[in-house]
Image (spheres, rainbow, N blue to C red):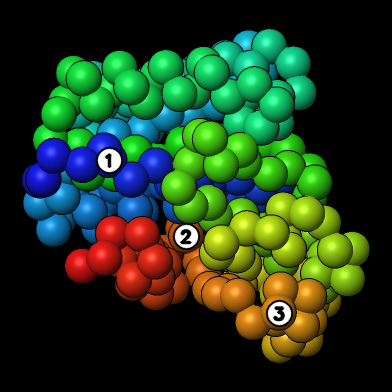
Amino acid sequence: MNDRRAARIGIGGPVGSGKTALVEQLIAVFGAADRSISVITNDLVTAEDAERVKRSGLIDPARVRAVEAGGCPHTVIREDPSLNIAAADELEAQFPDTEVILLESGGDNLASTFSRDLVDYWIFVIDVAGGDDIPRKRGPGVIRCDLLVVNKIDLAPHVGVDLELLLHEADLVRGGKPIVPTNARTGDGIAAVVAQLDRDVLFV
């Protein structure tokens, strides 16, 4: 680890899209590569996601922090990210070897975005059960994120979603910015997510 600040990577998306599952997969991959990682979760008035990550056995529980938004989830990642910035600073002070801090937003709608004062890079997660018209809705989260993750691809044939069409239309509205299809439950596509982070953020 060099002396530069840890990379701060935001992970946002609607409720149930698979954000926490993606976080757990990334922790496992980074941990297997002996790369130091810490996590901040956001929720309205609970620490449920943080407790889930702590119980996973994938990370030292002391490296996990919970921020309670107390209102709209996007407030603490966009309008006033000071609580998250403070939590990230505290983690880096306590664990100076930290290379990556993952900041998981509370579940929000397609308009949810991250402040650039908070994160260096952000991922937006959607899932195919939300319908193949999601890209056509042109939500700011889908369009503006650095990396779009289309999760639960295994469900496409069961919910009547044309996955190829969804990915094609997502590519059109994003102007060629990266998109990775995944099944975070099984780990499918996670290697591609990590490779994208390595190229765009971690420079390894």
Marks 1/2: CA–CA distance: 24 Å
Marks 1/3: CA–CA distance: 29 Å
Marks 3/2: CA–CA distance: 25 Å
Q: Image quarter for residue 204?
A: bottom left
Q: Residues within 10 Å of mark 3 (few under 14, many from 20)?
A: few
Q: Measuring 21% from the left and 42% from the top, which residue is drawn there?
A: 4
> In the image, residue 119 lies at what x, y percent?
48, 41
Q: Residues within 10 Å of mark 2 (few under 14, many from 20)?
A: many
> In the image, residue 140 lies at what x, y percent?
78, 54
User: The residue under label 2 is which amino acid type?
Assistant: Ala
The answer, for residue 20, to whether it is visible in the render is no
The residue singled out by tag 3 in the image is 175
The answer to the question of whether label 1 and label 3 lie on touching residues, with beta carbons closer than 8 A, is: no
Query: Mark 1 falls on what kind of element?
Result: loop
> In the image, residue 57 lies at what x, y percent?
23, 35
Query: Does 71 appear above or below 144?
Result: above
- Among the two numbered marks 3 and 2 on one chain, the one whose residue lies closer to the N terminus: 3
In this image, 72 relative to 25: left or right? right
The residue singled out by tag 1 in the image is 6
User: The residue under label 3 is which amino acid type?
Assistant: Gly
Q: Measuring 42% from the left and 29% from the top, which residue is drawn there?
A: 40
